Image (cartoon, helix red, strand yellow):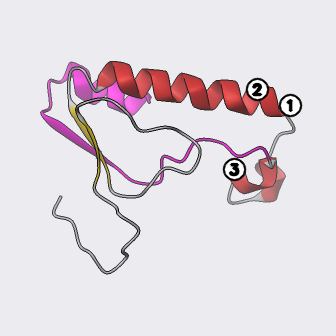
């Protein structure tokens, strides 16, 4: 989200994202190395995901945000947020 904010301040016209999934309730799913996982209550993970959704909504008012992969735990909404990924892995998108 900090990178999105930075790019928004630079007045870029579009941002393409991949792998911005949010956080699962199972902390082991959130990190590539299970030693990095932290134990938190599900409500905390949900609050982080809601916060990420709200910030993406805010930034999408200033810049077109497109997702190359479908987010797992955050909600994509807003006029200028697009899902390029449709679940069809053979479909290629131009960046």
Label 1, label 2: how far apart the Cα atoms are: 5 Å
Q: Nearer the viewer, mark 3 or mark 2?
A: 2
As drawn, the label of residue 30 is 3
State the residue at coordinates (87%, 38%): 39
Q: Earlier in the sequence, mark 3 or mark 2?
A: 3
Report the quarter where the C terminus lies: bottom left
Residue bearing the label numbered 1 = 41
How far across and down, in percent of the image, does residue 45 sit?
72, 33
State the residue at coordinates (56%, 51%): 72
Per the image, label 3 sits on a secondary structure element best described as helix
Task: Pick the residue in front: 83 or 59.
Answer: 83
Which segment is the magenta one?
1-25
- Proximity of marks 1 and 2: CB atoms separated by less than 8 Å: yes
Label 1, label 3: how far apart the Cα atoms are: 14 Å
Dot 2: few (<14), some (14–19), or many (≥20) neighbours within 10 Å? Answer: few
Q: Earlier in the sequence, mark 1 or mark 3?
A: 3
Q: Is residue 37 above or below residue 32?
A: above
Residue 12 colored in magenta in the image: yes
Q: Nearer the viewer, mark 1 or mark 3?
A: 1
As drawn, the label of residue 82 is none
Dot 3: few (<14), some (14–19), or many (≥20) neighbours within 10 Å? Answer: some
As drawn, the label of residue 44 is 2
How far across and down, in percent of the image, does residue 67 sit?
34, 50
Horizontally, residue 71 falls left or right of residue 7, namely: right
């Amino acid at each position: 989200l900090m990178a999105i904010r930075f790019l928004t301040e630079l007045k870029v016209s579009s941002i393409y994202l991949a792998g911005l999934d949010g956080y699962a309730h199972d902390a082991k799913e959130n990190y590539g190395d299970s030693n990095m996982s932290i134990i938190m209550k599900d409500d905390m993970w949900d609050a982080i995901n809601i916060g990420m959704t709200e910030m993406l909504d805010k930034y999408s008012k200033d810049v077109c945000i497109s997702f190359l992969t479908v987010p797992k735990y955050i909600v994509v909404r807003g006029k200028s947020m697009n899902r390029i990924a449709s679940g069809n892995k053979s479909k290629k998108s131009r960046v």
